[in-house]
Each structure stands twice: as C-alpha cells, then as structure tokens.
Image: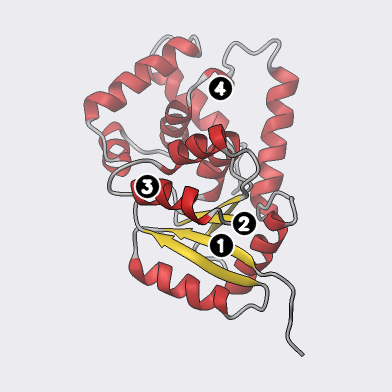
Amino acid sequence: MINSTPKSRIMILDDHPIVREGLTKLLEGEPDFVVSGEAEDIPSAIALLSQLIPDLLIMDLTYPTGNGIDLIRYVRKDNTRLPILVLSMHDSFLYAEQALRAGANGYITKVEAPKTLVRAIRKVLAGDIYLNDETASALLKRSLSLAKNAARDEHDVLRLSDREREVFALLGRGLGTRQIAEKLAVSIRTIDTHRENIKHKLNLKNASQLLQCAIEWTKAGPE
C-alpha cells in the first residue's frame, strides 16, 4: 500500500558540503522527511527560499560572508510561520538566546546524536520550541533573574545588542580582547569599541568593573 501522507520538505543551509550530504542522507532515511533543497551561503538561501517554500529551514549561524542571525531576522520580516532550526557548532548557551530572539524555533549543536536532531526537527515542525534541557533551564533561570532585578539593577544586560552580549559573555569566560577579536573574526579596534559601548550602557566605570560584571553574569549559565 502506498503511503499518501505528505512528507515535510526541509531545506538545508550550511557552507560545508560534507555536512549537507550527511544531513540529506539522515533526513531522507526518515519516512516523513524529504530534502527539498540545499544552499551553501546566505545569498543562495534567500534565492531558494522563495522558490522552494519549504516546511522547515535547518541552518548554521556562521558563513564566510554573512551572519546567520541576520538571515533569521530577514526571513522573519516576510515569513513569520516558517520553522527555523539552528544546527551549529557554537556553544548553545551563548548563541541559542540570540537565535531565538531573532526568530528561530530551536537550537541544537552538531555534537548531538542524529536521533536527537530528528526529534528536534519533529518538535519544531509541530510548532514547539526545541532546546536541550541544560540550555532551556539556564535561559529560564537567567530570564527570571533579569525580570526580577530589571527594575532596580543598573547593570541590565538586556540593554546590550546581540553582538555586545556576545562580547560580554566571552569576557566573562576569560577571553582577552585579542582572543575575542580572533574568535569573532573582527578587528581588535572593533572589540575595544564594543567594550566601551558595554561600559556606557551598563554604567560601568572601568575595565575592572566590566570584567567583574561579565564574570558574574556568565556564572548564571550552565557549568
């Protein structure tokens, strides 16, 4: 008997051919998935999205040119319903919050087991949000803490932009200016500018206060 149940059409955006091929084999092995298209960069993805009209977009966050967070925002301007699942090599605690705030429906790292990815896809397709338990717990804890203290805390991190919060978190993890610049592929001068903006927005007087505040904020994350 032929199965007439329509399959969910999934589009893959990743700049590594091996990753795209591996994902395609994994998803095509499921009875309810079909890979409708692949893209290796953001311009190609934008062009394909309007042609393919997928049921789900799986994407990474970093590319040689362009930023995945910006793409999520771009897609959300015209398509509020398309489920987006971020599949990334980056730390879920540091980047998941940014992705969700931009409009993603889930975040999973590439170190997870294939069956976990399949479960995440099905959950997002069903209209739910997917995060692993550790990340979800940490983000909830931080959200409750910020909500509780926002009215009286002059060091409100919600004032920072996504990139400033990224720099702030990396400072809290012990990285120096040069290390952060290398990690984010920007100049040292750019990081210095972010540091000054952070100090201004959080009413911090000097670099020592900035570092102490960053360390305390980062401690709210997973161990």
Q: Amino acid at mark 1?
A: Ile
Circle 1 residue: 10
For marks 1 and 2 on the same chain, the one whose residue lies earlier in the sequence: 1
For marks 4 and 3 on the same chain, the one whose residue lies earlier in the sequence: 3
State the CA–CA distance, disc 1 to disc 2. 6 Å
Q: Residue at 47% across / 53% down in the picture?
A: 51
The dot on residue 55 is 2
State the CA–CA distance, disc 4 to disc 2. 35 Å
Labelled pair 1, 2 in contact (Cβ < 8 Å): yes
Task: Give the structural element (helix, strand or loop) at label 2.
Answer: loop
Image coordinates of residue 18 in percent, x first then y, are: 36, 71
Q: Quadrant of residue 93?
A: top right
Image coordinates of residue 10 in percent, x first then y, are: 56, 62
Q: Is residue 144 left or right of residue 14?
A: right
User: Which mark's residue is nearer the viewer, 1 or 4?
Assistant: 1
User: Which mark's residue is nearer the viewer, 4 or 2?
Assistant: 2
Q: Residue at 54% across / 41% down in the picture?
A: 99
Task: Give the structural element (helix, strand or loop) at label 4.
Answer: helix
Q: How many marks?
A: 4
Q: Amino acid at mark 4?
A: Val
Mark 2 crowd level (few <14, some 14–19, many ≥20, 10 Å Cα): some
| Vertical position of residue 175 compared to residue 111: above or below | above
Circle 4 residue: 157
Task: Give the structural element (helix, strand or loop) at label 3.
Answer: helix
Image coordinates of residue 97 in percent, x first then y, are: 58, 39
Residue 204 in view, yes or no: no
Q: Is residue 57 left or right of residue 8?
A: left
Q: How is the image coloured?
A: secondary structure
State the CA–CA distance, disc 4 to disc 3. 29 Å
Q: Out of 172 and 133, give the one closest to the viewer.
A: 133
User: Which mark's residue is nearer the viewer, 2 or 3?
Assistant: 2
Mark 1 crowd level (few <14, some 14–19, many ≥20, 10 Å Cα): many
